[in-house]
Amino acid sequence: MKILLMGNPNVGKSVVFSRLTGAHVIVSNYPGTTVEFTKGSMHLPEELGLSGETAEVIDVPGVYSLEPTSRAEEVALEMLKQGDLVINVVNTTNLERSLNLTLQLLKKKIPLIVALNLWDEAKHTGIKIDAGKLEQSLGVPCIPTCAITGEGFKELVSKIKEAKIGKYEYEEEERWHEVGNIITEVEEVIHRHHRFRERIADASISPKIGIPIAFMLLFATFHVIRFIGEGLIGYVFEPFFDNLWAPLMLKFSNILGGDGFIHNILIGRLVDEKIDFGESFGLLTTGLFVPFGAVLPYIFAFYLILSFLEDSGYLPRLAVLVDNIMHRLGLHGMAIIPMILGLGCNVPGALSARILETKRERFIAATIMAIAVPCMAQIAMVVGLMGKHGAVGLGIVFGTLFIVWIILGVLLNKTMKGESMEIFLEIPPYRLPYLQGLVKKVWMRIIWFVKEAVPWVLAGVFIANILYTLGIVDVISKYTAPLISGLLGLPKEAVGALLLGFFRKDVAVGMLVPLNLTLSQLIVASVVLTMYFPCVATFATLVKELGIAAMLKSAAIMIVSTLLVGRILNLVIGNW
Amino acid sequence: MEKILSELKPKEKGKAMSEIVSVVKMEIGQTGKIVEIHGGAGMSLKLENLGIRVGKEIKKLNQQAMRGPVVMAVGKSQVAIGFGMATRVLVEVGKEEENNENSSNG
């Protein structure tokens, strides 16, 4: 059996999905589109009178209507044809908008159950719904639920067998009217004064208070991420690698005879007869330390905070606050989402540019993200490398990238044909994230990172090793010296890092470690490494998302702006 | 925009206590009833799906600086729409005092 979850956006549909399905969840693209949906499975328990079999549950993209106004809504309509049963997740706090969809679903003649979700929130805001009456008027089961606490879910599942094809008839033009009639019959609204949470909600989106709050949040976020990341590295990962893994690898090194091709590939070079996770560059030493010891703690911290911000409902507010700035870059407020996701990893950042309506917007957003937004893996390595010099260096790196981001956006907006779309979004009330859902989300993202990133890190370390062992870096660095040293003021060996930056930026930063760069060189190298080209995973994603022609254009912009910015930086701070 | 307003004005002259303005011209915290939405079918449908349609009461919650988006409450939910879109949603607002400000708009 195929069960579809359908409802408006922001009605807690994904939490309902989490509740119904087990741990095994697949996110995939609808064939031929860029629209994503989530698929899972649920057991239909016999003790509730069901078949005892397993049903497939599909979390259909949130829609307001079955008259499509976007690609996601078209996909939802397509998926509807393949389902056996629909659980219509309704926002009890906004029955009017939800019922508009419900009535349209009833016309599709597919077995339906209605989950009156956010039941508790409705109660708090003074909305009382007579579920029995609603069930009578619609002719399908209507069950009050609260996905966060799990209230009503047993009943919801047991009612699956009672799902019915609704008999509700109405004229299409009269739909809003019909919705109004039903609401007068089943809903009672008691006026409540503004609660504290609502006041905060209103304040956080007003320009005067909202913008300072946004800056404070940004500041706090950086500190929390650093605190968690550094804490995990200092107390968990470094001790593990230094005290357990290093001695083990040293023994292994002895077994392999301390030298030779296989030894150098797996263990790398010993520094003072010891393993140095930064400089050894073997698959089992640096290859494992970079993704797990240095990057993963920050990735975890970042996704924890990001998922919290997403689930709490803050991001739409941020989108409204930055809308103005984004318009200067030819984008609208929602384009902040690819930028924020890009800070975690440029791949999801590039993918999320899909939420923008036009090709032009997607091109600008993806290009300035790929150029000026460093990913968390790279940030983690740069922080590790530059940390001993204090915050000034980091400030210059991020400040420069931010300025580049703005200037490039403004230039692209001025030079590209077409105009900006306007922001249009619902602002959900603040909600306390559902812990289990949050944990699941962070877990899925970590798994994703490990699967996507670790192979590339290993490949990068392997290739770096080969390049050095065969002396290829030396050969290339001879030819690129005028560019690297003359223009950017970096030692000619830094070309190795730039070559490897195509594989993984974190590995590339790692390759700067043995070069003993000065602070100004570190700054130039970090900025150049961020800008000059995306890593291979991002590159592949961008080709897929933008097309090869647009990607080439984007790449040309990257290389030109990198040389320009690198040169300017070198001129300004090179003589420190 | 100005044209639309001036076309509407004569009709409204009889109503001494109300005025028709676009959402952009509403004051923060003011409520009004939507009387007209100027836009293509796509835009109207999008707005309608979020509950913004002729006959609905809305309350303007805030507006970002420099032609920024407008946030308004429709029933129990909040919606943000861009400045341009907001100029095309016309609402009837109750006017407490009639003054010569009216004529300067038309």
Image (cartoon, rainbow, N blue to C red):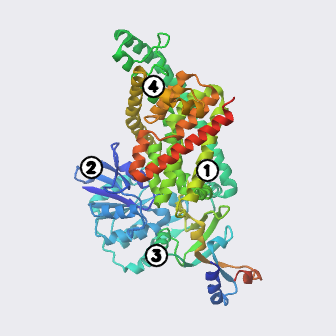
Q: Confirm or deny contact between disc 4 and disc 1 (CB under 8 A).
A: no
Q: Nearer the viewer, residue A239 or A198?
A: A239
Q: Nearer the viewer, mark 4 or mark 1?
A: 4
Disc 3 chain ID: B
Disc 1 chain ID: A
Q: Earlier in the sequence, mark 4 or mark 1?
A: 1
Image location (x, y in percent) of residue A406? 61, 50
Q: Nearer the viewer, mark 3 or mark 1?
A: 1
Q: Nearer the viewer, mark 2 or mark 1?
A: 1
Spatial CA distance of label 2 from label 3 is 46 Å
* Disc 4 residue crowd, few under 14, some 14–19, many 20+, Cα 10 Å: few
A152 displayed left or right of B4: left
Residue of label 1: A407
Q: Is residue A428 above or below residue A381?
A: below
Q: Amino acid at mark 4?
A: Val
Residue of label 3: B41
Spatial CA distance of label 4 from label 2 is 67 Å
Q: Is residue A294 above or below residue A63?
A: above
Q: Nearer the viewer, residue A516 or A244?
A: A516
Q: Earlier in the sequence, mark 4 or mark 2?
A: 2
